[in-house]
Image: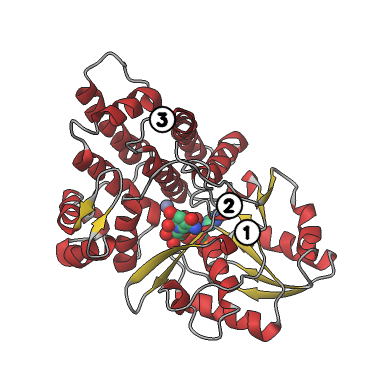
Amino acid sequence: MNSFVYDIPVKVYFGQNQLSNLGKELQKYGKRVLLTYGGGSIKKMGLYDKIVAEVKKAGLELFELSGIEPNPRITSVNQGAEICRKEKIDVLLAVGGGSTIDATKFIGAGAFHDGDVWDILTGKVSITHCLPIITVLTLSATGSEMDTAAVISNLETKDKIGYLHPMLLPKVSFLDPTHTFSVSSYQTACGAADILSHIIEVYFNMNQDLYMLDTVAEGLMKTVIKYTPIAMKEPDNYEARANLMWASSWAINGFLNGGKMQAWSCHPMEHELSAFYDITHGLGLAILTPRWMEYTLDETTAAKFHQFGCNVFGMDKDREPMAVAKKSIDMLSDFFFNTLGLKSTFTEIGIDETHFSIMAKKACGGGVLPGFKPLNQQDIETIFKACL
Ligand code: NZQ
Ligand code: ZN
């Protein structure tokens, strides 16, 4: 295991009725609060009213930015940063899924940049500060509630850029599984695919000395596989929603990748799909991941797939490794496309070959995407074609 620093200082309030602590947490950071949210799901589920009541009860001044899009746009981020500067906002309160939280992270950083926040994402300028962020999560998927990442889209340039910085880490996150009861069956499935992908991106690694991390990863994957169908069938099943919510945070909060030499593969490829076609992130990952697995499976990687098949899908350890490896990919496909009912090809979601070449080039930055198996533009194009 390589040396590493683990430093994820996010205070988590997990469970029901924790919003009574929201006011006191906000008060620690100031008086002027910018509430950010998406297209209105928080109003439909009654959460908006509860949040406003808590903020008012704490005697704080409330400002709002609504309408943050799925695959959040830089235009919304710029709008939010402008409000922060104009209204001298002290603290940000993001209520929603990964899109709202990600946009809020860049609103917090953008508040200190007097210009287009896209300049930070493209690396023209650095993050200097970020306003404190408190999140109330409503969708188990991205892990943004407990990680240093944010992903922002620019429709004009057809770019979707992921960015990591310790200053983007939320100070406090409220994880109440009941806030996810209203998530649709489809978004629950896409969220599950995203959580699984975060784990798979670090689990498929050639290091041999990661037993402890691998065992935790396998437990998290089994959790997602066990509870997603239950949450889809019974949206208000607390046990299922709670297990998915905590799994989403731990899949990507910096714990699983500590000690590994690692680089991600399916995420860079998927971000190009979302950038060009504005598809749901988890759906793109579900279609890509089994094809990426098929492409990377060979004699040198089969042992890892064998481990995956045996420890996650309960396959027989004594069977021939390559047979187990192939079967494990089939079982993951079966989970995504039959159990979760997600579409299984690009063709079904309106993606054809038109942009494969440029998307592949952008995914690997014109060079090589390092990872479980290094991929160049040609490799990525081949994987894209296998998804048609
Ligand atoms: O806009 P609203 O009305 O909130 O509706 C949302 C949206 O339509 C809805 N929703 C959320 N909570 C709900 C709900 N509907 C009913 N009840 C609720 N409780 O679900 C839809 C999708 O929401 P969104 O926030 O876009 O989904 P998700 O959490 O999957 O976030 C996706 C974004 O996060 C990025 C993705 O690329 C994508 O842009 N990612 C962020 C990461 C990170 N910060 O670490 C890592 C990920 O790999 C990912 O790239
Ligand atoms: Zn993801």
**Could you tell me which residue is drawn at 74 percent across and 66 percent down?**
52
Task: Give the amino acid at mark 1.
Answer: Pro
**Could you tell me which residue is drawn at 35 percent across and 29 percent down?**
308
* In the image: residue 308, left or right of residue 96: left
**Could you tell me which residue is drawn at 80 percent across and 65 percent down?**
27
Give the vertical position of 385 relative to 93 (above or below). above
Q: What's the CA distance linking mark 2 and mark 1? A: 7 Å
Q: What's the CA distance linking mark 3 and mark 2? A: 26 Å
Sort mark 2 into few (<14), some (14-19) or many (20+) by Cα contacts within 10 Å: many
Which one is in front, 226 or 201? 201
Q: Position of residue 106 (x, y in %)?
A: 54, 70
* 2 or 1: tag closer to the N-terminus: 2
* 3 or 2: tag closer to the N-terminus: 2
Q: Position of residue 74 (x, y in %)?
A: 46, 75
Residue 66 in sight = no
Q: Position of residue 377 (x, y in %)?
A: 18, 59
Q: Position of residue 335 (x, y in %)?
A: 35, 35
Q: Which residue is mark 2?
A: 146
Q: Which residue is mark 3?
A: 209
* In the image: residue 302, left or right of residue 42: left
Q: Which residue is mark 1?
A: 170
**Quarter of the rendering containing residue 347:** bottom left
Q: What's the CA distance linking mark 3 and mark 1? A: 32 Å
